[in-house]
Amino acid sequence: MYEAHEREAVDVAVVGAGLAGLVAARDLLANGLSVLVLEARERVGGRLLNHTLGNGAVVELGGQWLGPTQDRVLALAEELGVGLFPTYTEGDHFLAMGGTIKRYSGEDFDLPEDASADVARALENLGQMAAKVPLDQPWLAEGADAWDAQTLDSWLVANAKTETGLSYWRTMVPALFCAETKEISLLHFLFYCRSGGTLDRLVATHDGAQESRLQGGSQELASLLADRLGDSVRLGVPVTAIRQDDEGVEVTHDGGVVHAGRATVALPPTLAGRIRYSPALPSLRDQLTQQVPMGYVTKVQIAYPEPFWRAEGLSGSVFSVEDDVSVIFDNSPPDLSCGVLLGFLEGRHARKAAKLHPQERKELVLSVFEKFFGPRAADPNEYVERDWAAEEWSRGCYGGRFGTGVWTGYGKALREPVGLIHWAGTETSEVWNGYMDGAIRSGERAAREVLDA
Ligand SMILES: Cc1cc2nc3c(=O)[nH]c(=O)nc-3n(C[C@H](O)[C@H](O)[C@H](O)COP(=O)(O)OP(=O)(O)OC[C@H]3O[C@@H](n4cnc5c(N)ncnc54)[C@H](O)[C@@H]3O)c2cc1C
């Protein structure tokens, strides 16, 4: 147990033991600095959270997939000896649209011809615009002001030629952002696509962001990193205040005070904004923390005795513009000790489901699974869900979303250190922003800043 009002001194205090904070601490320690990582929860990993099913198989309630060009998370997995295995996509998939359920094969959504051409045209236009967004300073893109003055939805309404195409975007975008097309600015959408390479790469399984899974679950990355950091990680100590002067920083947490030369705050902006700073943060930085709310997602993992859909030639993948669960994937463990389907309730669907009694919500979710996979899907061994907006130390997921006017008005304050305080967290990453890879990159960048200083 932590002694109340304990005082300690280190070179660097790191706030938050998600991937960003842990990686920053790893790099600082490797360069001979003393570090304390202060974590609010009684566990490490933040938005990564393993869950062990009744039969011992591990599934993830938070982030889980990784793929090509996510070089930093791939390198970390290798460094820690965490193996990869492919996401299961063999067989036919389902597309629910226009009141019908289509069974199809191949990697492209089998949209009706006119909608397919419509979506392809929008994709090409958006891709050309995204290619012009400088990842380090999106607000300097030619056209940034106009792009940041409208929501993605306004652009889609003005440019989509078919209702079906529009409904595709209004489901696909929440699946990527956990936010509605009307909740993010066009500029943010373009930045985010470019940050991960292309929109195709964000959406794809093969050669995309959903290509691989991690043996033992993604939280292993955080747990193994924390094991290496040993006593340098403190759990259950929410940081409440950071004071700085010429001498250094004083970080107050529930249980004590840490004196350090510098602090790295590895939190999403909205959580960083809950800490009290003395002197007060520069107004632009403080305003930024008020402008980047988290998305809303509830993730469900549903376990069956076996992956029965595979025997029927089904991949387990569903994309539905009509249901409260819009995305479903096969998430069975690699040893097939059981079958698992995962589903996401995003944006409006998550908000609606949160108002239901847990039993009603479970019935709602299972009714969607039954619609696609038959009565066996309604009778699982286990049903697990996680509403990330209800988590005090996350406030939502997958990440922070930028509405209109935020990048152009406040973007400069996202990474700029404030005196002795440095900012990390996936929301600050230029590359793979919002993903595990971006979190790691941000931790590495923040550590470099401290070392250079
Ligand atoms: C349902 C879901 C699905 C996702 N899917 C994917 C995916 O498939 N692939 C992918 O790459 N990414 C995915 N993500 C996103 C990915 O999980 C995040 O990008 C990444 O984990 C963020 O790491 P981080 O270190 O930046 O932030 P966090 O993990 O949020 O870490 C911040 C830490 O700070 C702690 N903290 C907060 N406030 C305080 C305080 N005051 N004092 C001390 N500690 C504090 C928190 O408890 C937390 O541990 C998903 C996320 C969710 C929730």
Image (spheres, rainbow, N blue to C red):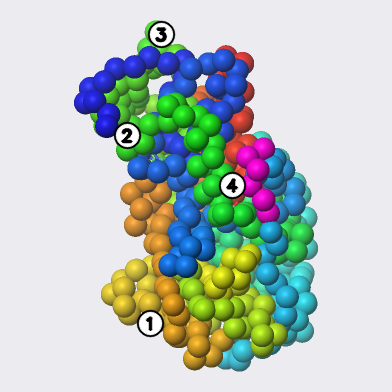
Identity of the residue drawn at 27% across and 29% down = 2
Q: Nearer the viewer, mark 4 or mark 3?
A: 4
Question: Mark 2 touching mark 3, by CB under 8 A?
Answer: no
Identify the residue under disc 3: 246
Q: Amino acid at mark 2?
A: Val
Q: Tell whether circle 4 marks a residue whose Cβ is less than 8 angstroms from ligand 1.
A: yes
Question: Mark 1 touching mark 4, by CB under 8 A?
Answer: no
Question: Which stretch is magenta?
Answer: 79-84
Q: Amino acid at mark 1?
A: Glu
Q: CA distance from mark 1 to mark 3?
A: 58 Å
Residue 231 pos. (x, y %) = 42, 27
Q: Is label 3 in a helix, a strand or a loop? A: loop
Identity of the residue drawn at 63% across and 37% down = 441
Nearest to N terminus: mark 1 or mark 2: 2
Identify the residue under disc 2: 237
Q: Amino acid at mark 4?
A: Met
Identify the residue under disc 4: 436
Q: Is residue 398 above or below residue 95?
A: above
* The C terminus, quarter of image: top right
Q: CA distance from mark 4 to mark 3?
A: 34 Å
Identity of the residue drawn at 45% across and 65% down = 53
Question: Mark 1 touching mark 3, by CB under 8 A?
Answer: no
Identify the residue under disc 1: 363
Q: In the image shown, does 446 or 413 lie closer to the viewer?
A: 446
